[in-house]
Image: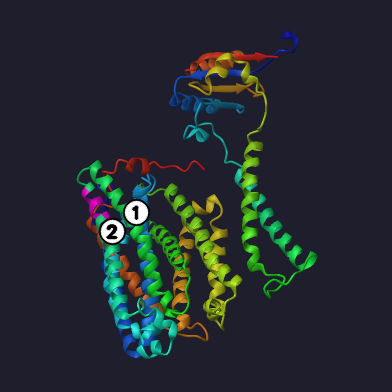
């Protein structure tokens, strides 16, 4: 790999992308074997891995939009990398197609006989039916793919020359896009994850999914920046000050994630109504209890304590290890959301869970890497670029 | 004014712009002065570094206060609802820690905020009614308006009115003035 620090270009992208693609294709092919062997398990493993990576890509899209909305300066050097993560959304849309073939394996509301015997599902069937589910999925991916593609196209155009009118237009799209994003992410998490148990409902569920995604995206961004730094890319551009700020975001969104998840839990615990508590009861059976406790401590307590000090956030080792830990915790949380309707008595891990997780993750990395190889790694004509490079945390 | 009670509070020099003040602060720091301060109508980025200031202690004060708030909040709820006045509420155990979380969280935040606020006041030695520098006419009239001042306190081990005056003039200070009053 060769990198030109003057033009911010990867002159020779090296074999990292190709290797990721090979791992991804191998992982997906192995998952295909899983489909043939045990379709029920395959679809649950696949859905968990897919929503895990999609949440991260959606976090990237949010990060880019909020960057424009607040006219952020410090994050300019991270903008192109974030766009490249968000650009994996259309690829994840393609990877979502197998799920549409597995509705019967995943969602009990998709069985006509189950619905016929269940008054509540009958009442919900105007919304929860296979054709409308597919239409909605297409709409969600269309919104996100458009936003990710548009924001990246405008940013790449800016590399040829700055145009204030274009930046103003992008801000408008980001503002309207943010509203569309909030509604679509909420609805998508309801459709894909909450409807696994269609009797149960929680209005804050979408916020939980979004919070997990944004938190993990920032962790992934830290890891990607460290990978680039190890290869001698952007070493003078992304400084310890940026890692410090990313560490603050991980810390803050760990608390936000805990706050929204606890808000959901507390109301259900207080109300103590069986139709609501069943969802948590399902996750407190057998070894599910262990997984629940791992999430409470691993997803909240560990990063909360580790990242509390300034020196931890400024140490690439501590921050990098914590970021990798958060990605693992994010997958376990998605597993915890998807699996209890499938394996009721307790959690169990086979080979399909890691294979789908690594396979889809490798595809996301391949997309990221090939976009990085195509364009400059920072928006060079952004008037705030130098300010971002020189950014210093006063505290 | 009683001349017998008159004392020297320090020496001040005025600078024309924030950038000049920043450069002067670096030189005063490098000259080894310990008890000096910079005064401007608004905060200046990089001033902490230019003055050679160490990290603030307020974070630790806030952290300790937050921990006291959290532990105190939890203990208060445990004691009131299991020892002092146990009441069965919707069939839940007396020690229902789930219900304690919001108040524990709230008290953690409240005491951490108090710690940050009062810790800031204490570390800044505030509030106080009077400072010797107010005796300077130019300081009082301009420091919150358009004046950028460096002051070296008379308690500084290196303080010597004549040498400080020469030094401040050499770094570009205007209207250098030894502040006296009673």
- Residue sitting at x 32%, y 79%: A99
The residue at which mark 1 appears reads as A65
Q: Is the residue marked by circle 1 packed among few (<14), some (14-19), or many (20+) residues within 10 Å?
A: many
Q: Nearer the viewer, residue A182 or B59?
A: A182
Provide residue A130's location: percent of width, then percent of height: 31, 80
- Magenta span includes A152: yes
Which of the colour schemes (rainbow, by chain, secondary structure, one colour) is used? rainbow
Question: Measuring 43% from the left and 26% from the top, which residue is drawn there?
Answer: B19
Rendered view: A239 above or below A226: above
Judging by the rendered image, the residue that carries numbered circle 2 is A147
Q: Is residue A161 above or below residue A223?
A: above
Provide residue A293's location: percent of width, then percent of height. Answer: 57, 73
Q: CA distance from mark 1 to mark 2?
A: 9 Å
Name the quadrant of the C terminus of chain B. top right
Callout 2: helix, strand or loop?
helix
Residue B181 sits in quarter: top right
- Chain for disc number 2: A
**As drawn, A147 above or below A328:** above
The residue at the far left in this view is A160
Is label 1 in a helix, a strand or a loop? helix
Residues in magenta?
A151-157
- Residues A97 and B23: in front is A97
Graded by Cα atoms within 10 Å as few (under 14), some (14 to 19) or many (20 or more), the crowding at tag 2 reads many
Does the magenta-highlighted stretch encompass residue B125?
Answer: no
Query: Circles 1 and 2: CB distance less than 8 Å?
Result: yes
Does the image show residue A133?
A: yes
For image coordinates 44% across by 73% down, the residue present is: A334
Q: Do discs 1 and 2 belong to a common subunit? A: yes
Q: How many marks?
A: 2
Q: Chain of mark 1?
A: A
Residue A303 bears which disc, if any? none
> Can you say whether A387 is above or below A256 in the image?
above
């Amino acid at each position: 790999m060769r990198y030109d620090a003057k033009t911010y270009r990867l002159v020779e992208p090296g074999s990292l992308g190709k290797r990721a693609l090979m791992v991804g294709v191998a992982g997906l092919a192995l998952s295909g074997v899983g489909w043939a062997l045990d379709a029920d398990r395959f679809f649950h493993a696949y859905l968990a891995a897919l929503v895990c990576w999609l949440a991260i890509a959606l976090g990237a899209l949010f990060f880019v939009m909020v960057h424009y909305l607040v006219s952020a300066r410090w994050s300019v050097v991270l903008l192109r990398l974030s766009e490249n993560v968000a650009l994996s959304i259309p690829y994840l849309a393609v990877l979502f197609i197998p799920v549409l073939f597995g509705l019967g394996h995943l969602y009990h509301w998709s069985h006509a006989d189950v619905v016929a015997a269940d008054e509540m599902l009958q009442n919900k069937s105007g919304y929860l039916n296979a054709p409308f589910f597919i239409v909605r999925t297409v709409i969600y991916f269309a919104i996100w793919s458009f936003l990710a593609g548009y924001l990246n196209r405008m940013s790449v155009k800016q590399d040829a020359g700055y145009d204030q009118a274009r930046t103003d237009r992008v801000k408008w799209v980001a503002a309207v896009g943010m509203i569309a994003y909030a509604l679509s992410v909420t609805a998508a998490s309801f459709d894909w994850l909450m409807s696994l148990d269609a009797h149960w409902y929680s209005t804050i569920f979408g916020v939980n999914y979004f919070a997990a995604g944004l938190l993990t995206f920032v962790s992934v961004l830290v890891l990607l920046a460290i990978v680039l730094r190890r290869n001698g890319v952007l070493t003078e551009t992304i400084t310890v000050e940026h890692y410090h700020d990313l560490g603050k975001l991980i810390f803050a969104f760990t608390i936000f994630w805990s706050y929204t998840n606890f808000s959901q839990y507390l109301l259900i615990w207080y109300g103590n109504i069986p139709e609501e508590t069943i969802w948590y009861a399902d996750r407190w059976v057998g070894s599910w209890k262990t997984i629940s406790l791992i999430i409470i401590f691993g997803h909240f307590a560990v990063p909360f304590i580790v990242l509390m000090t300034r020196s931890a956030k400024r140490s690439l080792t501590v921050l990098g290890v914590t970021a990798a830990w958060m990605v693992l915790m994010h997958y376990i949380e998605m597993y915890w959301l998807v699996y209890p309707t499938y394996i009721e008595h307790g959690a169990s891990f086979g080979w399909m869970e890691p294979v789908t997780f690594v396979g889809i993750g490798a595809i996301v990395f391949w997309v990221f890497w090939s976009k990085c190889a195509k364009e400059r790694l920072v928006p060079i004509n952004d008037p705030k670029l130098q300010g971002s490079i020189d950014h210093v945390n006063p505290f | 004014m009683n001349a017998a009670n008159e004392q020297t509070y320090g020496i001040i020099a005025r600078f024309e712009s924030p950038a000049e003040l920043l450069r002067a602060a670096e030189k005063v720091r490098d000259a080894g002065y310990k008890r000096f301060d910079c005064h401007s109508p608004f905060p200046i980025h990089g001033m902490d570094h230019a003055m050679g200031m160490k990290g603030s202690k307020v974070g630790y004060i806030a952290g300790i206060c937050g921990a006291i708030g959290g532990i105190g909040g939890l203990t208060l709820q445990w004691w009131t609802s299991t020892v002092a006045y146990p009441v069965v509420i919707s069939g839940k155990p007396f020690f229902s820690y789930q219900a304690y979380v919001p108040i524990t969280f709230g008290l953690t935040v409240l005491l951490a905020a108090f710690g940050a606020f009062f810790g800031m006041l204490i570390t800044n030695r505030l509030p106080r009614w009077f400072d010797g520098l107010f005796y300077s006419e130019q300081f009082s009239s301009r420091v919150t308006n358009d004046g950028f001042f460096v002051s070296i306190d008379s308690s500084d081990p290196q303080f010597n009115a004549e040498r400080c005056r020469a030094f401040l003039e050499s770094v570009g200070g205007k209207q250098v003035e030894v502040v006296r009053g009673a």
